[in-house]
Image (cartoon, rainbow, N blue to C red):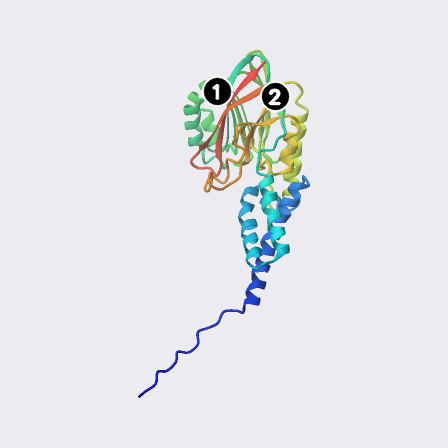
Amino acid sequence: MQGTIPAPPGPEGPPPRVRRKAARWAAGLLLALVSGPLLCRACDVDGVTPVPQLLAFLPWLLAPAGAALVLAAGTRWAAGCAWGLAAVLGTLYFLPPYAAGGAAATGPEVARLRILTANLEFGEATPALLEALRRERPDLVSVQECSPEECAPALDRPQVRAAYPYRIVVGGGRAQGSALLSRFPLEPDGSVPGTLAMPRALVRVAGARLLFQVVHPMPPVAGGVELWRTELGRVRAMAAARGEAPTVIAGDFNASQDHAAFRAVLDTGVRDSAAALGRSRTPTWPSLTAPPLGAQIDHVLLSPALAPRHARFLDLAGTDHRGLVVDAVLHG
């Protein structure tokens, strides 16, 4: 009788010791990626590339921190488990809204204001902005990347001028241009120096003089972190020197609450409207993945004389940013 021929042995995987070592290396690399941003966050600094870029997405560091903790636990790596647990708990610790800001507004109600900020991405979202102006009817509008080809001429149309007879439109490039629109009389009040235009106006609202500042510092790209930090520092200096005037500071800050340079602005006593209303982690950029995944870098900051009442985020076709509308009450 012919005997059966045994099947050749299958390929064997790496031995358990090698697999365990590889898993520990993977866990260590993930924890190293997470630990740098967390350490900078705890030390109230933004660090150098790639830390500022990673800090913008701090909540999502839970994913690599959690994966590293699982790998460390699966290989019984005690030091890795402690490290991974510290990374997870550290990320969770920084998730709540940053608590700094001015006291709640008091005094009689003087006026109700609706504020809109929108980055048009080289002016490509100009039609979406015009539709938002018709639909939302904001009183004050901060526009970034208002290009001279699309945005500036559109804002000069008769129907837009009728709705917003008071305005400042400055900047010569597609990204450099900014606009400030108002239903109320205004007078130019200088600007924050920067690569991109950041104009400011004094707006007369119900007998009060309200300071309205457009914000758009350069982003913290590789090689440009120091410029970003410098320009946000100028925004902070403006906020600190605002005096007693009710103040609105609105725009694309290219920074989230996890950046020390942005928290320094809040430390001057202005409040982040979205954070005050429980929306501090609602992403505004990039719109391709927001709101499920992204960072909140577009903000409306208010001085204590203004109380935010409602905030909502707008999806605008043609831009990688979401718009932000804030309803606020001005107190005397």
Comparing 160 with 86, the one in front is: 86
Classify residue 130 as left or right of residue 45. left
Looking at this view, name the residue that lies furthest to the left: 1
Looking at this view, name the residue that lies furthest to the front: 1
**Vertical relation: 77 (above or below) 18:** above
Give how far apart the Cα atoms at labels 2 and 1 are: 26 Å
Residue at horizontal 57%, vertical 20%?
Answer: 306
Comparing 233 with 9, the one in front is: 9
Instruction: Tell me the number on the disc at residue 54.
Output: none
**Vertical relation: 217 (above or below) 79:** above
Which residue type carries mark 2? Answer: Pro
Comparing 163 with 110, the one in front is: 110
Where residue 240 appears, x then y in whole percent?
Answer: 67, 26
Where residue 207 appears, x then y in whole percent?
Answer: 57, 11
Residue linked to disc 1: 164
On the question of residue 258 being in view, the answer is yes
For the residue labelled by badge 1, is the local secondary structure a helix, a strand or a loop?
loop
Residue at horizontal 52%, vertical 69%?
Answer: 14
For the residue labelled by badge 2, is the local secondary structure a helix, a strand or a loop?
loop
On the question of residue 50 being in view, the answer is no
Q: How many residues crowd around disc 2 within 10 Å: few (fewer than 14), some, or many (20 or more)?
A: many
Classify residue 288 as left or right of residue 44. left
Residue linked to disc 2: 304
Where residue 30 appears, x then y in whole percent?
Answer: 58, 53
Picture quadrant where residue 77 is located: bottom right
Comparing 237 with 79, the one in front is: 79
Picture quadrant where residue 308 is located: top right
Which residue type carries mark 1? Answer: Tyr
